[in-house]
Amino acid sequence: MKEVVFLDARPIGVFDSGLGGLTTVKKMAELLPGEDVIYLGDTGRVPYGSRSRETIVKYAREDMAFLRRFDIKAVVVACGTVSTNALDEISGDYDIPVMGVVSAAAAAAVRATKSGRIGLIGTKASVRSGAYDRKIRELLPAAEITKNACPLFVPLVESGRLDPDDVVLRTLAEEYLAPVRAADVDTLILGCTHYPLIEGVIARVMGPGVTLVSPGAETTRELAAYLAENDLLREDGPGTDRYFVTDSAEDFASVASLFLGGSVRGSVERVSLDE
Amino acid sequence: MKEVVFLDARPIGVFDSGLGGLTTVKKMAELLPGEDVIYLGDTGRVPYGSRSRETIVKYAREDMAFLRRFDIKAVVVACGTVSTNALDEISGDYDIPVMGVVSAAAAAAVRATKSGRIGLIGTKASVRSGAYDRKIRELLPAAEITKNACPLFVPLVESGRLDPDDVVLRTLAEEYLAPVRAADVDTLILGCTHYPLIEGVIARVMGPGVTLVSPGAETTRELAAYLAENDLLREDGPGTDRYFVTDSAEDFASVASLFLGGSVRGSVERVSLDE
């Protein structure tokens, strides 16, 4: 008789400023197919990346408070902007791990680089925070870090402009990536949930010698290792997802499938965070 | 002895999803230099134009409730998205006029058109609402209206990409304006606060035979006429402005001067709408 393996059935909480964090949920479906996921996308207030740190912290606290209504075993902060600006403020008092995307991505970049020259692109708030710089230098004090904010990448992706031959996308990619190319980095951190969707054009502009690091994917690997080491995996069947959004649930499916790369599995509900 | 003219010293309230409504404040400084202005920009939740009608109505109600804390004589809803999606919901119970930008702009477009073919560009929510269509057809039932949403114009303007020779701006303008050009309109409503800043490239793409209508400017003219007719003008000196924002007040000046076309006159304060 086969032993039933059923270690910790509690779901994993994931939140993001909007729907970009679904790129991380997609990776979780690959690496942690048995897990249930509770996802919150603050679509009523997206984007966070152009806002002040103070506002980002306030919103992130409200997002966390919502997820904590559920009995979850870990939280993944899929949002690059929250991970770089508000992780300490929201993870302090909890007894479960709250994983931002910076730590795993910085470690992956340090493992990947040969020259020590690492690039970072992200939202204005992520780049301004210095969070990646600090984490990379903890691991590799001599690292040379070159970074640039790419404020139009998010609206471009959300407009569905993903074609590497699109002149608008291509022109902006060349402009935004010029400083990291000029610094001759050999590793580039794609510090925003939306960027994996335009990895094609980024790779083409950066050229073949540059390793691209996706924080969401690296963090999912870190989460999988953590759950396995601590006997917290749920292994008794395909997981199900529950999605919560703060704007209308009606438009969810069309945008969500862009980031999930397929159809949505699970229910979608609208919630209010200020109640 | 010169008679003191001092008819109604109460300020005018203006609100917008963000800072784009300052293009209307700029016009007010020109046409109504004696008036005090209280401006609210919901910079903590901007943009509204990509959100659902339900969320736009909720936010607009909170914006109105904030302005009503002041003893004001009129409200200008500078935001095209709110004007097209939520004007009835927020103007119902008040004893002062609440002016959206649709009415004056539709009237101006109908006066300007010779062919009856009128174009409209705006946010996704503004275009979807049908508010301009209804108002134009009330005045000119035979009008042929062609419209298109331009979701990337707002982030482009906020990134400071205003140069008509910028390949990104030019490419998107040609793409977004193709349907209204194909319809051979002779009048085009610039249905979003940000568009006057890129009027140059829009005019170039549309060609010289097309009249561009700016709703904020038309609405300011309508407001000036209303105040004069109802003895509500304040004429005893240069007005002062008070600005309120829902995100940090620190970044205000740099973005505000983009829309005001000069330096900011008046104080800036951060407020919370959910308190």
Image: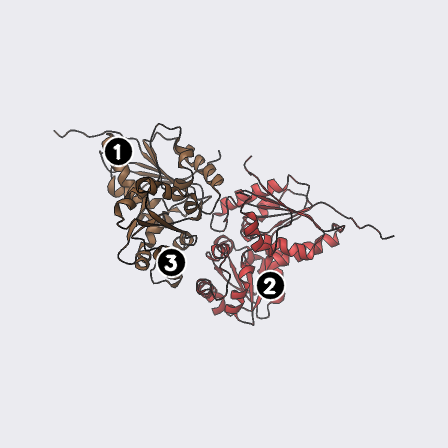
Chain colours: A brown, B red
Identity, as a three-letter code, of the amino acid under mark 1: Leu
- Of residue A19 and residue A151, the one placed in the foreground of this image is A151
Q: Are marks 2 and 1 on the same chain?
A: no
The Cα–Cα distance between marks 2 and 1, rounded to whole angstroms, is: 63 Å
**Circle 3 sits in a helix, a strand or a loop, which is it?**
helix
Q: Residue at x 60, y 40 (%)?
A: B66
Task: State which chain disc 2 sits on.
Answer: B
Q: Which residue is mark 2?
A: B109
Corner quadrant of residue B244: top right
Residue depth check, mark 2 versus mark 1: number of the one nearer the observer: 1
Q: Residue at x 56, y 72 (%)?
A: B209
Farthest residue, direction left: A1
Mark 2 Cα shell of 10 Å, populated few (<14), some (14-19), many (≥20)? many
**Circle 2 sits in a helix, a strand or a loop, which is it?**
helix
Q: Which residue is mark 3?
A: A178
Identity, as a three-letter code, of the amino acid under mark 2: Ala
The Cα–Cα distance between marks 3 and 2, rounded to whole angstroms, is: 44 Å
Residue B177: give x, y in percent of width and height.
48, 65
Q: Are marks 1 and 3 on the same chain?
A: yes
Mark 1 Cα shell of 10 Å, populated few (<14), some (14-19), many (≥20)? some
Residue A24: give x, y in percent of width and height.
32, 43
**Circle 1 sits in a helix, a strand or a loop, which is it?**
helix
Identity, as a three-letter code, of the amino acid under mark 3: Ala
The circle on residue A227 is: 1
